[in-house]
Image: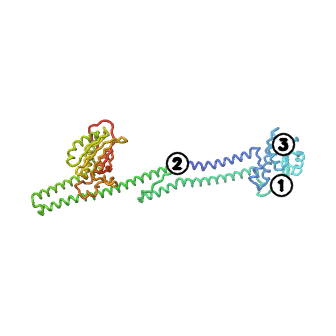
């Protein structure tokens, strides 16, 4: 998991922890280093102090080692010369000569020197007393007789005194104070720097996505729903962006659905107006003919009245179909579900309708490849679908006798397919999806309302969709139109009907 995927609360805690932890680690590390320098005798303080304060030359380091030499002389334990030898070794690195006595016995003297000569020279140049130092431009002379131990010592050598920057007045305690102030300043500076870096990092991680989200919200408020929201984080902001993206997609889908419904409503109104205007004009013409005496014989009057009745019945059927389509579209039509063997159902239905259809000029053949296929349907509504498909084959057949082949096959996954293939005039490939739109008809049939309302296949699609199936159209080879229906198979045997509203 990346840092940007952590929750914001954890990132804030992490940044605060880092802001405190790193300066503390830095201060502790430096403090430990200073402690080691000051406490362990095997570290050459002269080299360290000369590196830190090079302006003072060896002056500060020599002063520091002389102070340590006095402290270790006061703490001397008989037979343990190692602490004194370590300090003496550091002083000798600066070019000084050291002599250490226990009472009148020589404990230590610098190589190639005589302890007596070193002691004599130091005592001769310093002021009388147990602790004296003479330090000038020419060199250093130091004498110390401890009041807590039998140690006497002397240090001499040509180490000049440097006055620059007042470093000569620093004692060991003052050195620690200066180191503390420097360390405190560095710690504060490091804390501020880390705080600034973490603030900029959090700004990039939090503020930048929020600004993008605000810009997207402005676009949504202005109706621009086509700009996708790219989600790169997996924290609270990422979840918020994902919620905005889901909202944008839902709003766009609602807008597209609304636009589609608006177009369908306009097309529906236009279709109703067109399909009602033609029969109303016919009825009006025949009525005027009766009123004005154009139908001047009993035969003409009977013919005019029959045309008025037939046209009125066509309008009634159109209104009923339109009402059914509206109820299906709104989901207000109750389905009475029945588990049936669709193969047997089609076989029985087509066997009963064979002769009536032949009299109307349609020869139907049936092919059952599936054998046995149980589906859940509403018998009445499914019969309406079959009748609409057969009526279209009759209306648009090209020859005196048209042919319709009904085939039942099994397809994956677990579906049965019904194919109704005729040899009629067919439809252009680009117009096939439009067949299931309300009031769609080919141009040749558009002006003849007797060939249908243009709602038959639209109603069929609504019914098949309600049965969890799908319906589409294909061109028959070499000519004609094929309507295909797929329904999901059900396990078990057929049963009696039950109502499911």
Q: CA distance from mark 1 to mark 2?
A: 64 Å
Direction from residue 298 to residue 203 in the image, left or right: right
Q: CA distance from mark 2 to mark 3?
A: 69 Å
Residue drawn at the location 31% of the way across and 56% of the way down? 264
- In the image, 59 versus 243, the foreground residue is 243
- In the image, 417 versus 496, the foreground residue is 417
- In the image, 316 versus 358, the foreground residue is 358
Residue 325 percent location from the top left of the image: 27, 51
Report whether residue 329 is seen.
Answer: no
Helix or strand or loop: what does disc 1 sit on?
loop
User: Which numbered tag is attached to residue 151?
Assistant: 3
Asked whether the beta carbons under mark 3 and mark 1 sit within 8 Å of each other, the answer is: no
Q: Quadrant of the C terminus?
A: top left
Residue 279 percent location from the top left of the image: 20, 58
Mark 1 packing: few (<14 Cα in 10 Å), some, or many (20+)?
some
Report whether residue 417 is seen.
Answer: yes
Residue drawn at the location 78% of the way across and 51% of the way down? 61
Q: Nearer the viewer, mark 1 or mark 2?
A: 2
- In the image, 347 versus 184, the foreground residue is 347
User: Which numbered tag is attached to residue 5?
Assistant: 2
């Amino acid at each position: 998991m990346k840092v940007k995927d952590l929750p914001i609360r954890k990132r804030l805690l992490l940044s605060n922890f880092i802001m405190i932890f790193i300066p503390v680690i830095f201060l502790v590390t430096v403090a430990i280093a200073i402690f080691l320098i000051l406490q362990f005798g095997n570290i050459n303080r002269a080299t360290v102090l000369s590196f830190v304060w090079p302006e003072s030359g060896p002056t500060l380091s020599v002063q520091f080692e002389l102070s340590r030499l006095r402290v270790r002389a006061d703490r001397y334990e008989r037979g343990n010369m190692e602490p004194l030898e370590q300090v003496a070794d550091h002083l000798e690195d600066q070019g000084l000569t050291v002599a250490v006595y226990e009472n009148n016995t020589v404990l230590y003297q610098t190589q190639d020197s005589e302890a007596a000569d070193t002691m004599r020279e130091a005592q001769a140049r310093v002021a009388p007393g147990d602790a004296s130092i003479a330090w000038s431009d020419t060199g250093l002379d130091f004498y110390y007789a401890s009041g807590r131990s039998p140690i006497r010592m002397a240090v001499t050598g040509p180490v000049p005194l440097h006055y620059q920057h007042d470093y000569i007045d620093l004692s060991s305690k003052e050195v620690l104070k200066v180191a503390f102030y420097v360390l405190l300043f560095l710690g504060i500076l490091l804390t501020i720097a880390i705080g600034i870096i973490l603030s900029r990092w959090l700004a990039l991680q939090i503020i930048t996505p929020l600004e993008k989200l605000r810009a997207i919200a402005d676009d949504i408020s202005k109706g621009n729903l086509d700009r996708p929201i790219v989600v790169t984080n997996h924290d609270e902001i990422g979840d918020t962006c994902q919620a905005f993206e889901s909202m944008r997609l839902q709003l766009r889908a609602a807008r597209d659905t609304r636009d589609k419904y608006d177009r369908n409503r306009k097309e529906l109104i236009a279709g109703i107006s067109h399909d009602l205007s033609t029969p109303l004009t016919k009825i009006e013409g025949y009525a005027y003919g009766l009123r004005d005496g154009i139908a001047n014989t009993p035969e003409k009057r009977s013919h005019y009245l029959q045309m008025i009745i037939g046209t009125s019945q066509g309008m009634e059927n159109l209104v009923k179909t339109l009402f059914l389509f509206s109820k299906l579209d709104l989901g207000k039509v109750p389905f009475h579900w029945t588990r049936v063997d669709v193969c047997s159902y089609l076989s029985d239905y087509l066997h009963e309708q064979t002769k009536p259809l032949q009299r109307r000029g349609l020869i139907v053949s049936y092919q059952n490849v599936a054998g046995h296929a149980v589906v859940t349907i509403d018998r009445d509504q499914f019969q309406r679908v079959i009748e609409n498909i057969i009526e279209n084959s009759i209306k648009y057949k090209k020859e005196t006798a048209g042919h319709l082949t009904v085939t039942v096959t099994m397809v994956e996954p677990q579906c049965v397919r019904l194919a109704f293939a005729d040899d009629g005039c067919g439809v252009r490939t680009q117009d096939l999806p439009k067949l299931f739109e309300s009031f769609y008809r080919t141009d040749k049939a558009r002006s003849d309302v007797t060939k249908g309302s243009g709602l038959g296949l639209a109603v069929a699609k609504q019914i098949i969709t309600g049965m969890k199936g799908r319906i589409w159209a294909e061109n028959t080879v070499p000519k004609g139109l094929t309507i295909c229906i797929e329904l999901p198979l059900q396990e078990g045997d057929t049963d009696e009907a039950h109502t499911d509203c």
